[in-house]
Amino acid sequence: MGYECRSQDHRLSRRQLLGALAGAATGSLGLADEVRAQNKQVLFLWLDGGMSQLESWDPKPRTEFGGPFRAIPTTVPGIHISELMPHTARQMQHLAIVRGMCTRDENHSTGVPLIQRGDPRNRGVTYPYLGAAVSNFIAPANATLPPYIHIKPYGGGFQYGDGGFLGPRFGALALGDGQPPIHILRPETIAEDSDAARNRLRAEANRRFVEGRRGEEAAAYDYSFEMAQQLMRRRELFDLDRVPAAVRDRYGRHPLGRHLLLARRLLEAGITFVKVTSFHWDTHADNFHYHIDLMNQFERPFAALIQDLADRGMLDHTLVIAMSEFGRTPKINEKLGRDHWPAAWSLALAGCGIKKGVVYGRTSDKGSSVADGQVDIGHLFHTIFAALGIRNPRYRVRGQPLPAAHDDMAPIREVLL
Amino acid sequence: MTRLTIVLLALHAGPLLAQEPLHRRIDDAIASGFKGPFAKDADHAAFVRRVHLDLAGVIPTAAEVRQFLNDESSNKRAALIDRLLAGPDFPRRMQEAFHVMLEERREVKESPLADWEDFLLTSFASGKPFDQLAREILAADGKPAATNKFYVDRNGEPHLITRDVARLFLGRDVECSQCHDHPTVHDYKQADYFGLYAFVNRSFVAKQGKVTGLAEKVSPGQVDFESVFDTIKMKTGPRLPSGKEIVEPAYAKGEEYLEKPNPKEGKPGVPKFSSRAVLAQQLTSAKNSAFVRNSANRLWYLMMGQGVVHPLDQHHSDNVPAQPKLLDVLAEGLVELKFDVKAFLREIALSAAYQRSSMLPGKDEPPTGTFAVAELRPLSPEQLLYSVAQATGGLEAVVRKTATPAERAGAMRTKFGPSLKGFVTAFGNRPGEAEVAFQPSLAGALYLSNDRVILEWLEPKDGNLAARLAKLTDDAVAEEMYFSILSRPATTAERAETAAHLRTRGEQRTLALRELCWALLASTEFRLNH
Amino acid sequence: MNDAPVTTVDPTRTWEAKTIPVPRQLLGCRISSCGEYVVAGDFAGAIHRWHLASDRHTVLAAHSSWVKALVFHADRRRLYSTDYAGTICCWNYADEEPQPIWTLRDAHEGWIRDAVVAGDLLVTAGNDARIRVWSANNGSLLRELTGHGCAIFCLAVHPDGRTLASGDNHGVIKRWDLTTGRHERDLNAATLWHSPEATMSLTGVGGVRSLAFDRDGATLVAGGMATTTSANFAQGTPAVLAYDWAAGSARPSLRIPDPFEGFITSLAFHPDGFLIGAGGGVGGALWFWRAGEQDPFASLRGLRHLRETHLHPDGQRLIAATFEARGQGGNGRRGNIAEYVDNAGAVKIYSMTPRPSPPRR
């Protein structure tokens, strides 16, 4: 039954896509340039559909809802995760697990944007996705590459709806299957200075056109050309053939493996916010059989990535987040599946500003509710901003200051350094 | 006067007290729904470009623009509208738009694209009313085979077909109500979903020799369904949303078929009763307000870039349009015009709303959906390709020898087929995705920047734009370039900039012209229908 | 009036004769070849045993992970149980309070999905893609059959007792000689497998869910899922493929003309020659086909999801492990947390002989 609601290509209303406010003056209030100069980065791994917390971060073996899998110890004494994550278990010393997530929305189509925009409780404006928000706050001013890149299966393009009220410029450059678009090579018949000249003329024509008209479309279209230029200059980043075969094997040749490896390269190149999406986690049937394969596809490259970031000294300034829009029901349905469960689920953090080797929050013995340390998406967003050193993040939209996340929630101190 | 005469007069009072023309009713409805400010009228250059794109699917030539601007007759806009509607490009433009709207660029080898395009082209060329077209597509009786496409492209999968029938013909995205009443839209019930499903779940794709067709089984009885949230079992027969279950004739076992299935000969059989045929009749009736409103809304969207109800598949009571009266007027009008597409689009094109400028009336943008200012809408990949060809001078020779819609479409398909594939990849959505919003893509920017074919078109050759410009003085270059590419005169500043750039490049005149032309082709102004 | 029960088997008159509720979900069930005992494995690793005549219920506790594959050994009054941790236990099933006679831990890596008996051999297979042949007496490992490239879902022993059929996740059926361990050929059941690419998923869906030989071993049938519309919801139509076992060639598939969403979970040939197929998906169903016919001559619809069925040795009854809904809460809805309990199971006995008329007063 199509519960997936075509979530990966869900079309928002045009109003939402182009942002609710034309010409909104936005910016980050009172944010020191020093934060930008610190070149902090984010890897946001989105497991779309709802990874099962019971088959990953919060196993409950031998309980009513526990399923057939066991729990295994990790490199941190006292912390156990599912037996389906043996590689990740050996990286636990870098990770912080949050087990008390309790959110509102059990639908994909509304839940995904809700989570990724930080659920700002409908203030009449469209909040930006996390990637746009973070880029807005900390992307270095002199960045030559787009600050927010989204590696995903299927189609690419520019997802300018992610920018929300920040405007289309803050959208995500989506790389379909991690590929740069074709035509990334300029024909030899066009010299570089000619390319520069024609683009200057183009930009001037656009500036004239936009006067007296709505600016969103022109801004987005302009930006697509800017990005084209930037990407053409750095096209070697996408060429995984330059990576030794042994490394590619360690991450795995499957899509998520390749995409996380590409993510590492983009982080190495200084991209501020890299989002990697993996779809099809919505295991309404045969949840346990599927999670054997699913978890292998996720945890092997995830562990490899954590290891590599740690080895390269990048974990100190790179924040890693791995999550879904909700977890899965403790209750097992007739098809041996689990359904949607926003009431009690887990996510993992690592890196910049995050404590190492900890768990925060606890679910009940059976896992059906949060017993301790219950947190909502607002807490998570505040935690992310705090971890990145963004103190008191706010926006100014049409002169009105707005909080960057739910304003009566606070960062989760227990996972912050 | 006898009572009889009075009655007769009353019967005839309808046409005598004729309503205002639809285009005026449209503007009245819009005025009553929004206090303003409204944008002013678009100037003639903006109008001629816009109406060519909307009714012919391509920008006008420089000559056509000049002729229109120089024409001093007071009704030149109406005359142009009529000329374009009667012209050989209109059917192709509609065929392109409706292929994208209904099939979302699906290409399935069992259902040849060319046959489908011909079917749509012929339908629009012959003035087939829209309800009849919809009926033929939904009934899919295989005459011609291309009418099967809606089903065959979806592999006969009944859930997918249910969702797309609801979305595209009734304006309701009911996907989430397959499993339970829709979580956020109160009007979309699971029972309605399965009522529609029961119409189409007997149809299946069957290969009959080399031809892939659509067959139908006899009734399997009512459809069972239950919500995932409770285990209450429910049943329904075929039923339109807010309609009644249809009455199906009961046949004795063995008597249900007109033509019994014969698996050995690959014959799937033809049942006496076709629920699909009933769906086609009932759904496309003028009395089915969901169908009428959805059709009117989508045709409006084709011309305006924004539905009265938007998104186009979100008709429900919580999604109140900014101009509710407008949709009532459009729906009434469509029925009055008996679903005549040309007549309906003509009325829209004649309205002040359509002819509004895209220049904002003040510093604040009017709210979306008020139609107080013209939308900025992306050219479709087809419009963009043909317009680039037109602008660079490569289209005229191709279409000059063609007269009928079929000849025109055929010649363009032949000449530009490979380029069209490239444009669709760079500027269109993936197959199966609705092409509704403007999504400027990196792929598009790279395509325009680096594609060799486009760059070739900018090289002087055979009297094309580049060749013509090479022979002109600096000042004349700007004029010819702006008329050809942006379909309007150049401003003083633009003439100055053009001349300055030509001077900078000096002897490298070809290079300079290439840079200037490319800049305009890659500009937002060219990319959009404004 | 003669009130003697009619014992002619007539599947068109199949009815549910008995339901035994179980508080945990069940994965499978079997009946002993003496017809006295029914066993079913549950999510807690408990093996429920019922003595049919007395209704006595006993729990055989030794496993700690899900128990699916259970198989009886007729001659030795033994029951073999397997679980998803790879453990095998052997029991004297008719003991008053059975205890394992022997236990093999790590008999497989990961889930054991099926177990069959052939003479003195116990054969098991599962996620580690290896078929292991054990002594049914003492559990010593005799042989390992490798070749499958992915999880093995089911096994079937040919009536000759020497040949084995195995079916896997990707629609490959292998034929083995049990006496030599030789792999003899492959049969193609690829239409039962729907790849990740074909289903827009990361895992794909399908596989050979059940295998059964007819009484003389001329025909092998394989059950699973045909066309699918969603891997994550395991949505599709049930499929039964058929093969000429000797020639190794495909025969026309059987058909299920009425719409049903789900898999074929069990297949079994009746001594009278007809085939019984059980369906599990959205609810459950039973279908009955006569030899040589593609369409079922009888079916029972609107049942609970059947996880496994097994034919009673008397040929008159079918035992089934079913899913039973319980408690509140569904997709994302929690309801009252105190009432949030897992779903449950049941063992049902379907009778294929006509229901006796109520006794006259």
Image (cartoon, coloured by chain):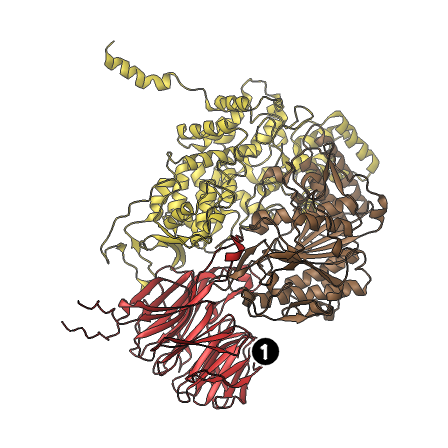
Chain colours: A brown, B yellow, C red
Provide residue A343's location: percent of width, then percent of height. 59, 54
As displayed, is residue C75 above or below residue A362?
below
Asked if residue B465 shows in the view, the reply is no
Of all chains, the one bearing label 1 is C
Side of C18 relative to A5 (left or right): left
Circle 1 is placed at which residue position?
C109
For the residue pair B75 and B278, the one nearer the viewer reads as: B278
Mark 1 residue element: loop
For the residue pair B209 and B371, the one nearer the viewer reads as: B371
Amino acid type at mark 1 = Glu
For the residue pair B435 and B109, the one nearer the viewer reads as: B435
Q: Residue at x 39, y 81 (%)?
A: C32
Provide residue C164's location: percent of width, then percent of height. 45, 83
Asked if residue A54 shows in the view, the reply is yes
As displayed, is residue A327 above or below residue B411?
below
Provide residue A40's location: percent of width, then percent of height. 80, 52
Side of B310 relative to B210 (left or right): right
Numbered circles on residues, count: 1
